[in-house]
Each structure stands twice: as structure tokens, then as C-alpha cells.
Amino acid sequence: MAAATVAEADPAETDGAAAAAAAAAAAFTDLRDPGWNESQLRQYTFPTRQIPRLSHTDPRAEVLINNEEPVVLTDTSLVYPALKWDIPYLQENIGNGDFSVYMAENHKFLYYDEKKMTNFQDFVPKSHRIEMKFSEFVDKMHQTEEQGGKERVYLQQTLNDTVGRKIVVDFLGFNWNWINKQQAKWNWGPLTSNLLLIGMEGNVTPAHYDEQQNFFAQIKGHKRCILFPPDQFDCLYPFPVHHPCDRQSQVDFENPDYDKFPNFKNAVGYEAVVGPGDVLYIPMYWWHHIESLLNGGVTITVNFWYKGAPTPKRIEYPLKAHQKVAIMRNIEKMLGEALGDPHEVGPLLNMMIKGRYDHGLS
């Protein structure tokens, strides 16, 4: 069972970032899908390790999911009917409803919560969401590809009953028997949504974490997924809870500011490249940075988001890292409500802890 564990970080290994990166590159050579190569990956400064890639029938996969650690599952047939999806098929069959499409001036699509923008009136989002028909989205995408413009698009739409009949038939043909058994086995809550993601090559969703369990099913193209466990919270510097970019990392992975974010030097990622038919389990509270491979064409993904298992009546100590993250979030929320102004939360927390816990107490 210990051999299946991926999340136990050895601090000594973080000192040899170059060696670790070289080891990761060697691992890629052995494990990569022949449909991509390393020239399609963006370069970062932090080391990574491989996320295990296992058949869904492999007992080690069950150990990892039980431990809430990531694993790439093969042979699930979860989205088999959708593997034929491409842009022409979807354009013909997806229907005439409106779709949420994000537009950005570069390849980074940093999520923001529009409802929280009133808390930070000076905040200017780096992307914006508009509703458009699927055909309009395709035209925008082709226009950028043909004209080489900087503006990029990313469709992110919850699948619902507005889609066309053939898409509904494909959706009903997903391997619900398998995924429902997973939900029951791990005592997860209900399925909350299935998010359809259609992105241009090179699109990046910067590092963030979700408060739900996720089976990330790749349908078309390849995506690189870099994950960080909850115990690296202090390395990734999330925005405040009341900020529109709550749960997102403030660190620019492509140009990290180590003066502002010194602990980012200690970050160690776990990564995998997923291709059509692969299903990546992303545990709740695990950070994930997702990129469509460079020069890899359009990517299509469907997320299966589930609420986590109910809080046990008897709490076991010591608490796990994700439980501590949940506590920190609740403290921020309560302080914001008590103070009446989210901008006062940071100064109060600094006043409360600054210098008080920096040295041993007797």
C-alpha cells in the first residue's frame, strides 16, 4: 500500500530541483502517450513527480482514491460515447442554446467569481464571460487561429437539457454504472454538475483548488495536469476568501515573484498528461493547474463534480491538511462577516499572529 502513495513529500528532495526535474523528464519518456511530446509542455521552475497511471481494475487505484490522492484511470469507458466528439459533430448536434464562453487577451484563464467583485471594486478581471451560440464560439476560435490574434476563447458550460438529442443520447450512454459505484464506495455526496470544457491549444487554467471531488474525463486532445497536495497551501498563496479569485493561486507560474511568494520555491508538483479516454481523479482541496498542450489542437473535457463525504461524527486527530484548509476558510468567512468589511480581515489576522508564534514559547 505504501508503494501507491504519491503525496508524502520528502523535503530533502526539494533541494535538488534540477535533479528532480530531470528524473521527471525521464519518467515522461517511459510513460507518455505517443500522441504528444515534451516540446508541447510549458517550462516551469518547480520539480514534479508522476501521478500513477493505472487500470481502474488495479487494486492500487482503489488505495489511492481511498487516500484521496490523484490517479489517472484507464479503461473506465466513462465517456466512451463522447470520444467521437469533435467540433463538426458538436456544431451539428449540440443545439442552438447559449453557451458560457470566456475570452482572454492571452492564454491564461484565471477564474473569478462575479458575485464577489463588489468586495474589490478596483479588481479588473483578466478574462470576461459572454454568452454565445456554439457556432459563434467556433467562428471566434477559427478567427483567432487563422489571423493569429492574441485574444483566445474557452468554452465552459454545464451540460443541461438544452443540448441536442444526439448529445443527450451520448451523455446517457456514459458509464454511469461505474461512476455511481465509485460515488457509493467512497460515500461521496451527490453529483453537482458536469462541466463541458472546450479549449484552444495552449490555453491554461492557472492553479486553483475546488471543494468537491472531481473525475476529470478527457475526450479530445491532450492536457497536462499539475497537482499540488493541500499541505502545500503555504507554497501557493491563494487569494483571500472574499476576493473574486478565491481559491486561485496568486503565483504566476511562468514568472514567479519569489520576493512576494518565497515559499513557492518549496512547491513540488505531481503531474500527468491525459489523453482521450483517460480519467484523472482530482481529490477535493488538491490544487490543479491545467494546460492544453502547445500545438496540440482543440481539447474537449467533461468534469464530474461530486460533493465530498459527510463530516464524520467522530473527528480523528491529527487533522488532515484539507481539513485545516477548510478551517482557515471558515475563519476568514466568519471574520469578514463579524467585521462587516472583508478588507479588515487581513490586518486583523496580521495583528493577531505577527511575531507571537515566531519563536518557541515556554
Image: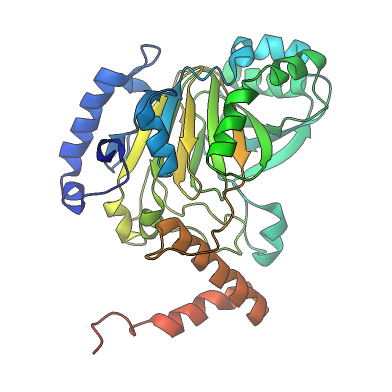
- Horizontal placement of 328 versus 256: left or right? right
Against 304, is 96 above or below? above
Residue at point 45% right, 18% down?
295
Q: Is residue 46 visible?
A: yes
Q: Name the spot of residue 229 as percent of width and height, x first.
A: 39, 48
Q: Name the spot of residue 53 as percent of width and height, x first.
A: 36, 25
The foreground one among 182 and 45 is 182
Q: Is residue 104 visible?
A: no
Residue at point 32% right, 39% down?
44
Q: For the image shown, how many numbered marks are present on the structure?
A: 0
The foreground one among 281 and 339 is 281
The foreground one among 126 and 213 is 213
Residue at point 37% right, 65% down?
318
Q: Name the spot of residue 327 as percent of width and height, x first.
A: 51, 67
Against 229, is 354 above or below? below
Against 153, is 47 above or below? below
Q: Please tell me in which quadrant of the rendered image residue 317 appears.
A: bottom left
The quarter in which the N terminus is drawn is top left
The foreground one among 245 and 314 is 314
The quarter in which the C terminus is drawn is bottom left
Against 59, is 128 above or below? below
Residue at point 61% right, 41% down?
306
- Horizontal placement of 334 versus 327: left or right? right
The way the protein has been coloured in the rendering is rainbow
